[in-house]
């Protein structure tokens, strides 16, 4: 059991968020995957990407972990924005998937080891954000070996040896708790070419003495100790308000369709609101993520869907179309979509330009140690391990 407090941030995280692939120099034969299968079955002759990064976040949600969860909510977008600049050795940009587990919470089933899969591997940034914001803390038993084992068993990590596969587990109780020996769990991870990184929320030596360091070392992962209750210092810039205004305009370029459309547009607005409520700077970072290649919503947005070579607006049923396109000819619909696409591209470019100025402003004002600790820990581990798979970080 633990005392209540506030805590850390994610990386990757996702990361995030359409389906992802690792650094593969040689193309492999794969079966084509139907895109937008809810509405039509396309024929795709284009070879799929094989550059996938899969990150599973295993977060302790017992009483003392509020700070960790808050950092994760805040710093998800920093990690996603960093991944925008990742390149594989074959010069392809990798995609990103994030999975999320919570453990050590009394509200979870004791029969399941106080463990819950909150999100399977997903590249949907809005979904990842929504699941993070759904987390709450409560006292419980923290079984690190068990949650690692569960994530290995339940998630589809794939067999491709070129893909980058990582687990980040964060908590503050001994790594040895529970019936399942953590050494067996991390050995299983290593056999699957999955690196386990451990983040101890507390004193460095305490984490070493309670086997958090050993849990990472056994797979070649990183051990990091952080102050999960440290206040994240966000630096306001002259560009923030403009970026937030552009984000509102960006939302108006989305054309929802199909069974998912309306709900996903509402989810988009809701996660904008969650980010803004947490802090204005977080809303700015989310807007920057939405202007990147990793924010793709082809399953419910006609603009993103139209970028797929197999997409044909004529194959979308009339009742799946938004009101503004009902009764229109194919040419009229394509013209409308193209207009929104051009508008979106312009807005995204403006956000990226302003963000470059924003980052320069922050770099000049930021003091050492002001970055979020979870963000720092995750990004350093990701870059180090990604280099072994021939990843580069270039803007």
Image (cartoon, grey):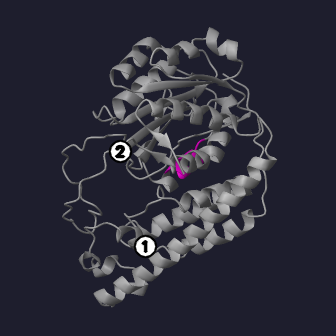
Task: Name above or below for residue 307 compared with residue 12.
Answer: below
Residue 360 within the magenta-colored segment of the rendering: no
Q: Secondary structure at mark 1?
A: loop
Magenta stretch: helix, strand or loop mostly: helix
In this view, the residue in front, 24 or 328, is 24
Q: Quote the CA–CA distance across marks 2 and 1.
A: 34 Å
The magenta segment is: 128-135
In this view, the residue in front, 79 or 155, is 79
**Left or right relative to 378: residue 46:** left
Q: Quadrant of the N terminus?
A: top right
Looking at the picture, how far across and down is residue 173, in whole percent? 62, 18
Q: Which residue is mark 1?
A: 256
Residue at x 57% of width, y 72% of height = 347
Task: Name above or below for residue 342 compared with residue 181.
Answer: below
Q: Which residue is mark 2?
A: 90
Residue 111 in view here: no
- Residue sticking out furthest to the top: 209
Looking at the picture, how far across and down is residue 122, in whole percent? 42, 47
């Amino acid at each position: 059991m633990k005392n209540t407090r506030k805590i850390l941030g994610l990386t990757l995280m996702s990361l995030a968020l359409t389906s992802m692939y690792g650094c593969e120099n040689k193309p492999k034969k794969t079966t084509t995957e139907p895109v937008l299968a809810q509405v039509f079955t396309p024929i795709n002759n284009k070879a799929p990407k094989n550059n996938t990064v899969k990150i599973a976040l295993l977060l302790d949600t017992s009483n003392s972990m509020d700070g960790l969860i808050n950092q994760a909510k805040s710093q998800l977008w920093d990690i996603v924005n960093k991944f925008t600049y990742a390149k594989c050795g074959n010069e392809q940009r990798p995609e990103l998937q994030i999975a999320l587990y919570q453990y050590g919470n009394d509200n979870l089933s004791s029969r399941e080891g106080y463990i819950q899969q909150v999100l399977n591997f997903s590249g949907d940034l809005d979904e990842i954000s929504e699941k993070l914001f759904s987390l709450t803390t409560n006292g419980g038993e923290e079984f690190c070996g068990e949650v690692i084992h569960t994530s290995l068993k339940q998630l589809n990590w794939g067999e491709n040896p070129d893909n980058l596969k990582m687990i980040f587990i964060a908590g503050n109780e001994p790594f040895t708790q529970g019936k399942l020996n953590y050494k067996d769990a991390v050995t299983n991870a290593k056999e699957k070419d999955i690196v386990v990184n451990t983040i101890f929320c507390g004193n460095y030596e305490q984490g070493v003495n309670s086997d958090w360091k050993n849990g990472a070392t056994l797979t070649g992962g990183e051990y990091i100790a952080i102050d999960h209750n440290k206040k994240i210092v966000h630096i306001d810039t002259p560009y923030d308000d403009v970026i937030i205004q552009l984000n509102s305009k960006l939302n108006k370029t989305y054309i929802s369709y199909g069974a998912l459309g309306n709900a996903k547009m509402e989810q988009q607005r809701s996660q904008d609101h969650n980010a803004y409520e947490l802090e204005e700077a977080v809303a700015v970072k989310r807007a920057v993520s939405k202007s990147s290649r990793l924010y793709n919503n082809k399953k419910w947005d006609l603009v993103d869907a139209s970028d797929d070579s197999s997409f044909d607006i004529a194959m979308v049923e009339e009742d799946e179309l938004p009101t503004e396109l009902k009764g229109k000819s194919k040419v009229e619909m394509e013209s409308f979509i193209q207009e929104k696409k051009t508008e979106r591209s312009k807005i995204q470019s403006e956000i990226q330009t302003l963000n470059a100025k924003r980052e320069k402003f922050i770099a000049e004002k930021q003091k050492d140690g002001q970055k979020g600790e979870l963000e720092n820990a995750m990004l350093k581990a990701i870059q180090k391990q990604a280099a072994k798979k021939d990843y580069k970080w270039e803007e």
